Image (spheres, grey):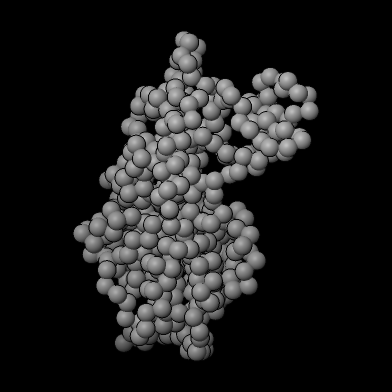
Amino acid sequence: MAASIVALIVLALALGPLLFVWRARRWPRGRSVCVVVVGDVGRSPRMQYHALSLARRGFDVTLLGYSGSKPHDELLSNKKIHILHVLEVHLIPVGPRVFQYVIKAVVQAVLLLYALLLKSPPVDYILLQNPPGLPGIAVCWVSCFLRGSKLVIDWHNYSYTMLGLTHGFAHPLVQLAKWYEKLCGRLSDLNLCVTNAMREDLAKNWNIRAVTVYDKPASFFTNTPLETQHQLFMKLGHTYSPFRARAESLDPDFERSAFTELNPRSRKVTQLDGRPALLVSSTSWTEDEDFSILLKALERFEQWINDGANLPSLVCVITGSADLGVCLHKSSSGLDLPMKVVDMFGCCLPVCAIHFQCLHELVKHEENGMVFMDSEELADQLKMLFSEFSNSDNRLNQFRKNLKESKQLRWDENWEQTVFPLFTHTQGVWPKT
C-alpha cells in the first residue's frame, strides 16, 4: 500500500508540471507551425523552404534546431519566421558505445521537450524532419499530445539505414532504431516523403501513408549569365591558377580568364575557343559517397589526354558555373534523392550521377544527364561527352536544352500544389493518400 502511494506521488510530481504547462498555454491560436530540425538549421534546405512557404501563406513559423551554418537571407529577414536554437548534444567519450547513444538520446529528448513546451509558442502543427528520428519523433508526439497539435513527419530517409552504414544492419542498436522508427512513425497525423519509392516502402513495410513531395530547386537557382561567370572566373583566378588565362589576348585591353574574354568597349563576354571544360562535384562528404570514384575517373581521363586524345583539359571544382555536374550520392536506404542534383537541374546543369534504386525519378539517362555504375563507366561518359565539346550541338548542350524545355516546377509552385492543401484542410480530417 505504501509503495502504491509513493508511486502515485512520484507520478503526480512528474506529470504535474507538464499538465500545468498544457493547461496554462492552450490559448486560442491562429495558423502556426513549428518546423523541427534535430540538426543544423542552415544545412537543412528543404525545411528552410517549408518554413518560407508556410510564412508566405500567412503561417506564424517557429524554426527549431541547432545553430551553425547561416540560413538563407530571405528566411532571416522574414518577420513571420522565428528561429529558436536548441543546444547540440554530442556523444560522451565514456563507457560502451550503446551507453553513449542512450545518454545522448535522453539529453536530447529533455532539451527538445523543454524547447517545445516552454520556449516555443503553442502551434497548430509540428513539422519534423526525419532523420534523425530518435528521439525527435517521440518527443514531438508528446508535445503534440499535450498541446493538441498535429504531428507531420517529412521523411527524407530512414534513421536506421544511416546508422547501419556505421554499425552494420545486423547490429542490435540498428535493429532497435528500426523498431522505434517504425513504431513511432505511425503516431503522426500526416506524412510527407521525397520519392514515390519511399512512399510505397512506407505503405508496404511500415503501414504508413505518405504524400510524395519532390525536392525542387528554389527560385534563386538559375542558369548563370555569361557575364556573371566571367566575373567569377576572374575572381577565382586571383587564387587558383587553373582559372587564369592560358594565353594573352591579341588586344591587351581585353580581360581574359581561362574560359572567357571580355571586350572592354562593347562589354560583351564570349567563351574562348579551346577552353577547358569545367566539372563541378557537389558532395556532402557522407559515408554513402565514394569520392575516389571521381578521382579514378579523372585519372583515366587525364591519361587519355596524355596519350593524345582530342579532349579538352578538365578543371574540377566544388562550386561555380560548370559544364557538367557529378553526383556521388548513393543513399543509405536507396529511397531518397540527392538535393544537390535538384539544385544543379535548377541551374540547367546536366549531371552524371551514380546509380541507385530510385534515381530514375530524377535523372533521366540520356535525357538530362547520364547514370554510371563505377569509375570506369564515369570515365567513359566523360570521354564521350567532352570528345564533342567544341561542337555547338554537342550532347551536353542537348541535355541543357532538355532541362530548359522541361519547364521544371520550382519549390514554391510544387509546394502550393502538394503541401499547402494539406495544411488548410478543415476539421482536421486530412485526405487519405
Q: Residue furthest right?
A: 253
Question: In the rendered picture of this protein, how many numbered marks are placed on residues?
Answer: 0
Residue nearest the viewer, comparing 104 with 156: 156
**On-image quarter of the N terminus:** bottom left
**On-image quarter of the C terminus:** bottom left
| Residue at the image point whose x is 43% and y is 57% from the top | 409
Q: Residue furthest front?
A: 266
Q: Is residue 42 left or right of residue 1?
A: right
Q: Is residue 256 left or right of residue 364?
A: right
Residue nearest the viewer, comparing 330 with 298: 298
Could you tell me residue 61's position as x and y percent? 54, 73
Whether residue 382 is visible to the viewer of this picture, yes or no, is no
Query: Compared with residue 3, is residue 53 higher up or lower down, i.e. above or below?
Result: above
Whether residue 270 is visible to the viewer of this picture, yes or no, is yes
Query: Compared with residue 307, is residue 34 higher up or lower down, i.e. above or below?
Result: below
Query: Compared with residue 239, is residue 149 higher up or lower down, i.e. above or below?
Result: below
| Residue at the image point whose x is 33% and y is 32% from the top | 373
Residue nearest the viewer, comparing 41 with 90: 41
Could you tell me residue 222's position as x and y percent? 54, 49
Query: Compared with residue 61, is residue 343 higher up or lower down, i.e. above or below?
Result: above
